[in-house]
Image: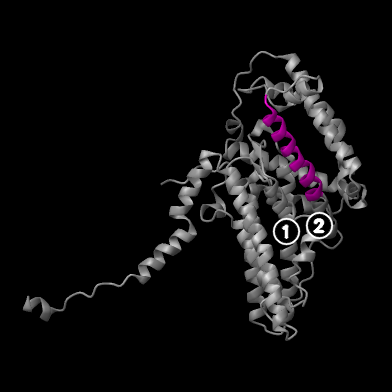
Amino acid sequence: MTRPKSASGIWTGLSGIVGCVAAIVLLHAWQAAPHLKTMAVVGLCAAIMIAVDVAVHRAIEQSGLAAQPAATNWQRIIQKLIGLWATFGLIGLCYWLLPIYADGYYRPFFDALLVMLPALVVASPVYIWFVDRRQASPEDAYVEIARLISGTVPRDWNVVFDHLRAWTVKGFFLPLMFVFLNSDLANLWSVPLVPTINGFHDIYDHLYDGIYLFDVLLASVGYLLTLKLFGSEIRSAEPTLWGWLVCLACYPPFWAQTSQYFSYDQDNTYWGNFFGGNPILYPLWGSIILVLVAIYVWATASFGIRFSNLTHRGIITSGPYRWVKHPAYLSKNLSWWLISMPFIAGTGDWSMAVRSSVLLAGVNLIYFFRAVTEERHLSRDPVYREYQAYIAEHGLLAVVRRLWARKSTPIAKPPNHAELVDK
C-alpha cells in the first residue's frame, strides 16, 4: 500500500521558519509599534510560504479552480461580497459583545485589524471576482448568506452552518495566535539578538521559547490563509459539540478552568530542579524535552499554510505524519511528563505524586478525545481513510508490533549432523 499524497509538506513550513528568522533579524532595530512589526513578520512569512507551496506542492492546482475563467456573473459576485462582509460583521459583533475581547490583551490584534481593513476592502471584491469565475461550483456559502439576508430560505442549511462553524474557528484562533506571537516577538526584540549563554540552562530556555515562537507563527499564517485560491480553504469544520469542547478546553480562556481541575504540578517538582546538580542528566533530560518540542513544531510545519484546529483543509501525510497519526499530541503530552515529572515525590509525599500523575493523565485523556473526534471528522474524506489504512500497516506502531512478534516467535532449532545421519 502506498502512502496517500500529502496536501502540503515540510518545505512550506520550513520556509516560513527561515522567513521568520530573517524577519526577526531585519526588524530588530525598527522603531515601530509591536503589532506593526508582528504584521510584517506574518506578512513576509506568509508570502514566502505561499510561493513555496505554489512551486513545490502545486497549491493552485489543488484549489480545483479552472485555468480558463467563465463569464462574469455580477449578481453572484455582489451576493458573495454581501455574504463575506456580513460574516465579518457577525464576527465583529461577537468581538464587541464578548467582554474578554475588550481586555487589553487582545489590543494588538485589533490594532492590526484596523491597519488591514482598508486593504481588505479593496482586495475582497477583486479576489471574489477572480475566484468566482473559476469555481466549479460558484454557488457557495457566501451566496447562501446573502440569500438569507434578503429573506430567501437557503437551498442548503448545512452549507450555512458549516460556513459559520469554519469562521468561528478562524474568529477564535486567529486573534489568540496573533497575540501569542506578538508577545513572543516583543520579548525577543527586547534583548540583544545574540543572547548571552551561561550553560545549558540558557540554551534550553532560548531554544524552548524559540521553538514555540515558530509554532504560533506557523499557526497565525495558517489561520490567516484560508483561501480557495491556494486550495487552503476550510473544507469542513468539526460538526460535534464534543469535538469543540475537548479542543477549546486546551486554549485560553477555557484552559484557566481546565487547569484548575487538572493541576498536575502543584508540588513544583520540575525537571530543572530535580536534575540541576547533575552535569550529565541535566542536559540529557533537557535535550530530550527539546527534541519532543521540536517534533511538535515539525508536525505544525508539515501543514504548511493549512494548519488549523477543528477543520479539514487537506490531509497531511508527510513529516512525522508519515509514521504517526497524531505526532503533535503525542510529543507535546510526553514533554509535559518530562517537564513536570509528576511521578516523582519531590516533597516526599507519594500521595501527591500519584495524584499529580492521575491529573496529568486526565489532560492526556483530553488530547486523546481530541484525536478521536478529529479522526471521526476527517474520516469523511476517503483520502484520510486511505491514510489510516497506510498507518495501520506501515506506521511506527505497526513496525514495533512486527519487530516484537518476530522477537517473540521461537526459532526452530536446526538439526545437527548426527541427527541427519541417523535419519
Residue with the most extreme left position: 422
Q: Residue at x 83, y 31 (%)?
A: 119
| Outermost bottom residue | 348
Give the crowd class for mark 1: few <14, some 14-19, many >=20 residues within 10 Å. Answer: some
Q: Quadrant of residue 256?
A: bottom right
Question: In the figure, 284 relative to 233: above or below?
Answer: below
Please name the residue that numbered disc 1 is placed on.
212
Q: Position of residue 37 (x, y in %)?
A: 84, 48
Q: Is residue 21 visible?
A: no
The residue under the point 82% across, 54% down is 253
The answer to whether any part of residue 337 appears in the image is yes
Residue 180, image x, y percentages:
80, 54
Q: With respect to residue 210, does 115 lie above or below? A: above
Tell me the quadrant of the picture where the C terminus can be found.
Answer: bottom left
Report the residue marked by disc 2: 184
Query: Does the magenta run of residues contain 167?
Result: yes
In this orientation, which residue lies closer to the viewer: 207 or 1? Answer: 1
Give, as a single range, the part of the protein colored magenta: 156-178
Residue at coordinates 64% horizontally, 75% vertically from top-left? 285
In the image shown, does 7 or 136 lie closer to the viewer?
136
Disc 1 marks a residue whose amino acid type is Tyr
For label 2, the crowd category at 10 Å Cα-Cα, with few meaning under 14, some 14 to 19 and many 20 or more, is some
